[in-house]
Image: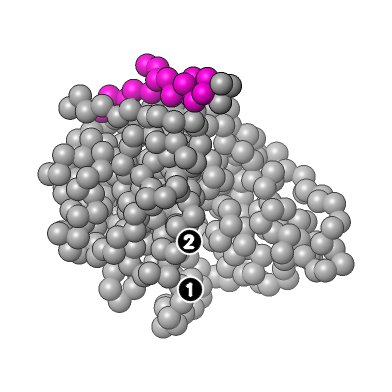
Amino acid sequence: MLRLQRTVVVGKRAYHDLVTLPGNKPVISSGPPGYSAVSGHRVTVFGCTGFLGRYLVSKLGKMGTQVIVPYREEDEARLFKPMGDLGQIVRMEWDMRDENMVAECLRHSDTVYNLVGRDFETKNFNFRSANTVGPARIAKIAAECGVSQFIQVSHLDASKTSPSKFYQAKAEAEELVKEAFPTATIVRPGPMFGYEDKLLTNMAVWPIWWKLNHGETKIRPVHVFDVAQALANLLAHPQYSRTLNLPGPSTLSYEYLLDLVSSVTLNPPSRAPVVPKAVAIAFAKVAQSVWWPALSPDEVTRRYINDSTVAGDWDAVGVQPSEIETHAITYLRRYRSAENSARPTVLPARPLGAVAEQF
């Protein structure tokens, strides 16, 4: 009898289970909260195999959302299988240049996330084709297929006047996406850190390339989990036709972050010299000949650009961003020696200018 009562109570629906999308399309959730729930949403996440995408898919799957995960390589898509209940994670092969394949991936979805982007150029995709033309094509097809919500992930420093081609391409993509899908939501996260990141873990391996500009460049690092949660929250609390800036809670210099990495890993600070910008760019051009992602000339340019000082919009997405020091040991412990593995973490003193923002 008790089991029956619990089943009946859980089965009840309330007004908060109903979300009305543009065009008066209803989305009704059901079931107990969590992995086996049914959120009522069907979502496509382009760029799901990237750093941010895998965490977003995981959070959507835990909400009971059916997620279509387009992939280019089968091996990269295997990790998505346990992220959702049976039938909730749908893998589909795609090519960003094929409009029919794009349409097939989003045809039945009410929400589309576009995380597609490349911060270095390859022989097949330059900055504009990967970060501008591709997102614009996806937005156009999404509008033609009647998708209710389109969320474009850009970058905090996106600007058409930026010296970085990557930031220029991101800014142009925002304009073209808005033109094709006027109610699109633009999300601009700051530099992200976490597992497999290109910030903390890269600093631990290649500190010499983070000394460019004498480490004076200021950035606003944000935890990838916080950004993924913010994107997931947009399903229940959509922000149509808005641009949401999601910077980290503090503005920190590369010099401080190098000190943080050294203190947490208990390794001595790097004695490598500060490489002049011209030399770094020349090295980056040579490094492009290798088959794996290496330091690119545009990335060298970005190492001299301070992050935008715009205010954060974390309240709109219901997330309180966490400080980088809180998670540093989680991602950097593996760089400690065996005898130092269990030693307590001692953080360096923050510089006077690194004041936490209030959101």
The residue shown at (57%, 52%) is: 193
The residue shown at (24%, 65%) is: 95
Residue projecting furthest to the top: 15
Q: Is residue 204 visible?
A: yes
Q: How is the image coloured?
A: one colour
* Front one among 25 and 294: 25
Mark 2 surroundings within 10 Å by alpha-carbon count, few (fewer than 14), some (14 through 19), many (20 or more)? few
Image vertical order of residue 352 relative to residue 120, above or below: above
Quarter occupied by residue 66:
top left
Image vertical order of residue 151 relative to residue 83, above or below: above
Residue type at mark 1: give it: Ala
- Could you tell me how many numbered marks the image carries? 2
Residue identifier under label 1 = 294
Range covered by the magenta-colored residues: 4-22
Residue 84 percent location from the top left of the image? 45, 48
Residue identifier under label 2 = 79
Q: Secondary structure at mark 2?
A: helix
Q: Is residue 310 visible?
A: no
Residue 305 percent location from the top left of the image? 47, 53
Residue type at mark 2: give it: Leu
Of callouts 2 and 1, the N-terminal one: 2
Residue 337 percent location from the top left of the image? 80, 69
Q: Secondary structure at mark 1?
A: loop
Q: Which mark is residue 77?
A: none
Residue projecting furthest to the left: 144
* Front one among 239 and 84: 84
Alpha carbon of mark 2 to alpha carbon of mark 1: how far? 24 Å
Residue 22 percent location from the top left of the image? 22, 28
The residue shown at (48%, 61%) is: 79
Magenta stretch encompasses residue 120: no
